[in-house]
Amino acid sequence: MIRVLLARLFQAALVMLAVTAVAFIMFRYVGDPVSVMAREDATQAEKAEMRVALGLDQPVIVQFGKFALRVVQGDLGISFRNQRQVAGLIAERLPATLELVFVATLISLGLGIPLGVVSALNPHGWLSKLIQSVSLVGISTPTFVTGIMLILIFAVTLKILPSFGRGDVVQLGWWSTGLLTGSGLRSLILPAVTLSLYQLTLIMRLVRSEMIDVLSSDFIRYARARGLPSHYINYRLALKNALMPVITVTGLQIGSLIAFAIVTETVFQWPGMGLLFIQAVSFVDLPVMAAYLLFVGFLFVAINMAVDVVYALVDPRLRTGP
Amino acid sequence: MALAASMFKGLIGLLRIRRVGSGLLRLIRSRPPLSVIIAGIVTAIVILCASFAPQIAPTNPLDLASFNLLDSELPPRWAEGGDPRFWLGTDNQGRDMLSAILYGARVSLMIGGGAVLLAALIGVSLGLIAGYVGGRVDAAIMRLGDVILSFPTILLALLVAGLARAVVPEAASPRMAPLILIAAITIHEWVQYARTVRAATMVESAKDYIKAARVIGFSPARIMFRHILPNVMGPVLVLATINLAGAVLTEATLSFLGVGMPPTYPSLGTLIRIGNEFVFSGIWWIALFPALTLVIMVLAVNVLGDDLRDRFNPKLRGRR
């Protein structure tokens, strides 16, 4: 297992290096940093001086090394648009996105697993056919359409839920939370439901197909033959075994949720990292774009690693290693 | 040159009319479920409407002279205050929504189709090479694919589209934007084709007819594109159908986020973006109709794709 982990760690390091390289290329070669930062009336001599001061006259590999060093220390540069430290901007927006993703994951697990089990236990019943059809519509509806529809129904027509912003937030140190106030929770409902829908259908379909597979396996047939009660077979034996891939997919999906949060945050004007990124894209604010890429890249690599490790711990077949 | 010629001949072989005809016959005899028939009809209607948009649309939404600001924000024909000239109402500039949707669906399908074609072309070629050549080439292509697949489509596409805006000065122009969108979607999608084709190629390469072709002394390019390619195309067609729905959705999302098609040459996503600004003032039709069109279109293609996938899945063959 240690060999597996080391190989994964090496692969993760390689991916992070590649992501850092892309971010470096964005900083260094997309547009000339000197012409962006210098005063408009700067002379050639001043520009050359600035080039030396920024280290742009050094070999590319040295520049990349310095860049990587700064990134590791958490120095992600200064935003072109609002002249603030990018790391600070991201830290400020992080809680909003993570709370949204957390609640959306809870919703999709809480609804997806029971619905998947129901449609697996009786795959030809009307309920499971209905669930299947609705899930196909769910997969075909883009996040932003769901969001607009929910706004149209609950905010514009019925006027019972707020449609934008986070409501009141409470500061816990540097972490700002909307989970402790009434208006914060109410503001969270529509965005979280919107974000959870896609993942909900995914988890539901996965639980269904895994359950059906497990239920037709030999050990379940044997348990039936022994006369064990059906709720014990269905929930203790079958569901437990069917949930294995759900761990993986849910873990991997947390990364996708953070990416999909870009869309949800745009629809609901939710002040998270996604909104920060999309604003950076429309203003071509390269440091913020690069920092977001680095941050999300790191998150993805970390999540992928964590899922692999958890999997190795849970699945006895992987424990001994190859 | 030899490679290009082999590829071309291979493609011609795939498109043999006789085969397509007998396949169609078999499809009709197999009695697909009602939902699949409806999905097929809907897809056909959408493709026809999109192809002939200039002929059937009441007005040309791309021609600034054809609409009038005085007609702006009119509700659909059947609603109170509707104008009989505009079946689905007008947008904030007085554009006929029906025409805008017909043209928008055309743009969405063209970009989605273009992305699927390009991704299939790149993915199938790299998959064939990886599977046939093997070794380091295979490892390099597949590891690159692993890295790309560990990020979601929308994130990579946003990054490419966003970067293109920084590099290409005319990135938002009607002529450049579709190309950038196609590239942005392709960068993620080719991997799936490459993985599928690689696995199938490895199976085929071990068979006797390929060994025989090698003994005869055919060039690797000829063996890959004329002998192996026709035998691994089945799953690729299924994948292409499923990915068309995904590509259309990705394009719509990018346009909705403002890094896709410009408002002067809107796709369905751009129309929904414009409509989104008016939802709060109770002007629902600008966003709702393009959104419905998009969902119906993608749903129909998804139903077809699911059915195709089940047909090709040997596990399910006996159960249907």
Image (cartoon, coloured by chain):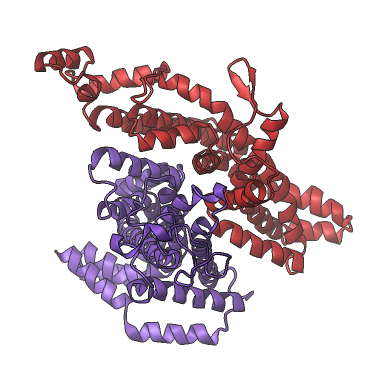
Chain colours: A red, B purple
Residue B278 position in % (x across, y down): 51, 49
Q: Quadrant of residue B11?
A: bottom left
The one nearer the camera, A318 or B260, is B260
Q: Residue at x 26, y 50 (%)?
A: B173
Residue B75 position in % (x across, y down): 52, 62
Quarter the N terminus of chain A occupies = top right
The one nearer the camera, A121 or B229, is A121
Q: Residue at x 40, y 53 (%)?
A: B189
Quarter the C terminus of chain A occupies = top right
Q: Quadrant of residue A25?
A: top left
Instruction: Work out which residue is located at the far left of the displayed protein and give it.
Output: A44
Q: Residue at x 54, y 71 (%)?
A: B307
Look at the picture and state if B95 lies above or below B311: above
Instruction: Tell me if residue A197 can be seen.
Output: no
Instruction: Tell me if residue A275 can be seen.
Output: yes
The one nearer the camera, B257 or A252, is B257
Q: Quadrant of residue B264?
A: bottom left
Residue A240 position in % (x across, y down): 74, 47
Q: Residue at x 38, y 69 (%)?
A: B233
